[in-house]
Amino acid sequence: MKCHSVSQSAVRALGVAALCLLLPLARPATVIGQQSESSASSGASLDYTFFKSRVQPIFLAKRAGHARCISCHKHQNQMRLQPLPTGSATWNEEESRKNFESVRRVALPGNLKSRLLVHPLAEAAGGDFYHGGGKHWDSQSAAEWQTLKAWVLGQTK
């Protein structure tokens, strides 16, 4: 059997590509584990009314240089948003409830390390290293990020 040599850069590139593909698959168990620990210890809860009126519109907002969250997340498994019905500007009650249940998987009550907060946030601002839709916020002081933070921390009153 003949072995072919492969350059180190090709191996590194394949390693990075594999990591990008496999990392999202490895996160659900971690997130689920953190969800139970965080929910039990923090006492924070996720407010559906606040989600529907303040958080959900963020997923539809247009941002310069970025796709709207709904553009990609209507196809995702971990945070799958309901597709908008043709001609609709927002979701109906049933669709909003489904969105709430989906987003809860990445919003750990009381936890600033929730994937909902760190995934679309620039790494320099405390976010994680990769988000397929780009980094939507360069700073934790961004108004939309502050809204997500308030929801995750239960500061909705």
Image (cartoon, helix red, strand yellow):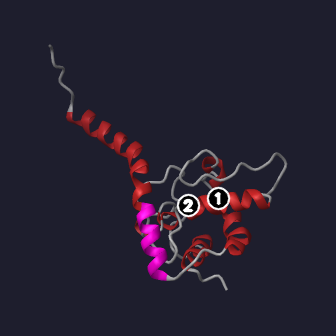
Quickly name the residue at label 1: 63
The N terminus is located in which quarter?
Answer: top left
The C terminus is located in which quarter?
Answer: bottom right
Left or right: residue 90 versus residue 47 is right
> For numbered disc 1, what is the local secondary structure?
loop
Q: Position of residue 73 (x, y in %)?
A: 61, 50
Q: How many marks?
A: 2
Which one is in front, 120 or 41?
Answer: 41
Inspect the image, locate mark 1, and give the three-letter code of the amino acid beneath it.
Arg
**Is residue 26 in sight in this rendering?**
yes
Please give the name of the residue rendered at 75% of the width and 50% of the height, measured from the top-left corner.
84
Which one is in front, 37 or 75?
Answer: 37
Inspect the image, locate mark 2, and give the three-letter code of the amino acid beneath it.
His
Q: CA distance from mark 2 to mark 1?
A: 8 Å
Magenta residues span: 31-42
Please give the name of the residue rendered at 78% of the width and 61% of the height, measured from the top-left corner.
93
Disc 2 packing (10 Å; few <14; some 14–19; many ≥20):
many
Does the magenta segment cover residue 116? no
Q: Position of residue 16 (x, y in %)?
A: 33, 43
Residue placed farthest to the bottom in the image? 157
Tell me which label, 2 or 1, sits earlier in the chain.
1
Q: Position of residue 32 (x, y in %)?
A: 45, 62
